[in-house]
Image (cartoon, rainbow, N blue to C red):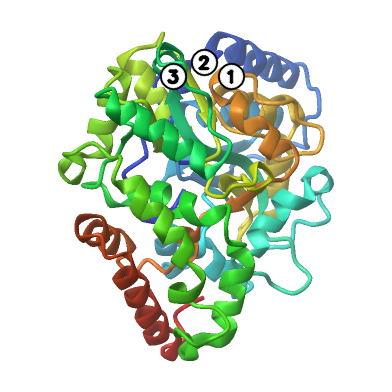
């Protein structure tokens, strides 16, 4: 919808349901094997009684999953207790000078603040760091860097695109579109047949910036390069600057305006939960959502035949890319009370049999060079994009949370004035740049 902190609380249940239970028996067997190995003394560290390690992760829907892993880690490390907690926000830990020893969070602008300030340890020397794909590791650098440090190890990659109902497409003999004109033609045919082409949930604002806004922009604009240049220009951003929302995003917002005409008529009052329910009941052909929605849809109809594809917004099929985000990344704060134990835990979680199982079971993609492909057929349509690095981080994830992007989009969809949306974004960027708050 895959992260993102702006909507973390609203999508906490996103990977629940089938995703959370997928392969549960095999997962428990794997964890049981790890624990058994620890009981036999395999890879046990020297006993140091009464040591406590604090592990915080962001996703409530995987608390039980990680708790099994942490108990297996404790078995391998007698005398070490791992306190497991979850929170949707990183800031309070650092404000109180009590950051977790190991964090497992969505990689976004909030985490970037602590990377930039040098408050996270360098993990580049860890063996597992050498296994991270460079194109995925580089996603963190698009938000912030600190000289000489690898502050975050990407753990789980969420790839998002258009979720579509295969049966509806097959019944109407519609192809999966590969160009913008094909996409419009498919939507037009569906609308003519009395079927909602694209289900939208405008009441839940993150869903329209994550889908409509991000998807329309991502295959037309190099988002990372755009925002790097926007940060350089700062308070001088405007219609005549080298790049700006008004200038650079105008073609993409024309696409967004067209897509919005194919939404369900009641989109403005429908929430994310409404969308999952409606799509699960087969009430629309397409849904601009990430893998976090698939588990919720499966709760409505576990047999619904779903597929995914990257939204085409140009006439060249080669331009298509998937929207991605580092759904979970591991980091160790500089203030960790037990750095060696924290590193041991990171290395444990990064073991291939553990990280690969997590991503398979939770409808995500692994971040390492040696990872197998995601096996769930519902995500197969995005696998090729992940394989070759044809992906982008959503434009909305680069916009500070103090900018009401979702509300601007609600207004633009209602009025059709997407130019006004872009002018508002430029004005907000200038205002924040003067305060030094754009990065």
Of tags 3 and 2, the one toward the viewer is 3
Can the viewer see residue 29?
Answer: yes
Q: Position of residue 297 (x, y in %)?
A: 36, 22
Q: Residue at x 81, y 23 (%)?
A: 42
Between the C-alphas of marks 3 and 1, the distance is: 20 Å
Q: Nearest the camera: 83 or 167? A: 167
Between the C-alphas of marks 2 and 1, the distance is: 10 Å
Of tags 2 and 1, the one toward the viewer is 1
Q: Nearest the camera: 48 or 58? A: 58
Q: Which residue is mark 2?
A: 22
439 vs 402, left or right, is: right
Mark number, residue 335: none
**Is disc 3 surrounded by few (<14), some (14 to 19) or many (20+) residues within 10 Å?**
some
Lower sequence index among marks 2 and 1: 2
Lower sequence index among marks 3 and 2: 2
Between the C-alphas of marks 3 and 2, the distance is: 26 Å
| Circle 2/circle 1 CB separation < 8 Å | yes
| Circle 3/circle 2 CB separation < 8 Å | no
Q: Position of residue 218 (x, y in %)?
A: 55, 54
Lower sequence index among marks 3 and 1: 3
Q: Which residue is mark 3?
A: 169
Q: Position of residue 60 (x, y in %)?
A: 40, 36
Q: Residue at x 72, y 45 (%)?
A: 389
């Amino acid at each position: 919808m895959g992260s993102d902190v702006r909507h973390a609380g609203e999508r906490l249940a996103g990977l629940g349901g089938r995703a959370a239970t997928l392969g549960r028996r095999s997962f428990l067997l794997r964890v049981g094997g790890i624990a058994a190995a620890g009981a036999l003394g395999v890879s046990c560290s020297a006993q140091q009684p009464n040591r406590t390690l604090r592990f915080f992760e962001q996703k409530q829907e995987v608390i039980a999953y990680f708790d099994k892993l942490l108990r297996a880690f404790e078995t391998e490390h007698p005398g070490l207790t791992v306190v497991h907690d979850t929170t949707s926000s990183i800031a309070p830990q650092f404000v109180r000078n009590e950051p977790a020893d190991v964090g497992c969070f969505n990689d976004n602008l909030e985490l970037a603040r602590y990377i930039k300030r040098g408050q996270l340890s360098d993990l580049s020397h860890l063996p597992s760091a050498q296994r991270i794909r460079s194109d995925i590791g580089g996603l963190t650098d698009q938000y912030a860097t600190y000289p000489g440090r690898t502050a975050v190890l990407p753990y789980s990659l969420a790839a998002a695109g258009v979720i579509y109902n295969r049966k509806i497409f097959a019944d109407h003999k519609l192809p999966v579109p590969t160009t913008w004109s094909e996409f419009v033609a498919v939507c037009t045919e569906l609308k003519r047949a009395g079927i909602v082409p694209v289900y939208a949930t405008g009441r839940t604002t993150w869903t329209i910036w994550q889908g409509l806004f991000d998807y329309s922009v991502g295959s037309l604009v190099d988002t990372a390069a755009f925002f790097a240049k926007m940060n350089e220009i700062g308070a001088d951003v405007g219609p005549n600057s080298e790049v700006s929302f008004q200038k650079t995003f105008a073609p993409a917002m024309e696409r967004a305006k067209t897509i919005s005409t194919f939404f369900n008529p009641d989109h403005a009052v429908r929430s994310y939960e409404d969308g999952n329910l409606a799509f699960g009941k087969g009430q629309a052909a397409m849904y601009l959502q990430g893998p976090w929605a698939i588990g919720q849809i499966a709760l409505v109809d576990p047999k619904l035949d779903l597929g995914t594809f990257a939204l085409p917004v140009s006439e060249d099929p080669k331009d298509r890319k998937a929207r991605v985000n580092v759904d979970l990344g591991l980091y160790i704060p500089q203030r960790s009370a037990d750095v060696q134990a924290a590193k041991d835990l990171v290395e444990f979680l990064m073991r291939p049999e553990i990280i690969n199982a997590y991503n398979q079971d939770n409808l995500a993609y692994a971040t390492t060079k040696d990872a197998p492909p995601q096996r769930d057929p519902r995500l197969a349509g995005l696998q090729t994009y992940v394989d070759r690095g044809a992906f982008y981080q959503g434009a909305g994830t680069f916009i500070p949370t103090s900018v009401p992007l979702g509300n601007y989009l609600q207004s633009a969809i209602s009025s059709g004035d997407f130019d006004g949306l872009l002018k508002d974004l430029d004005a907000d960027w200038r205002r924040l740049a003067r305060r030094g708050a754009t990065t």
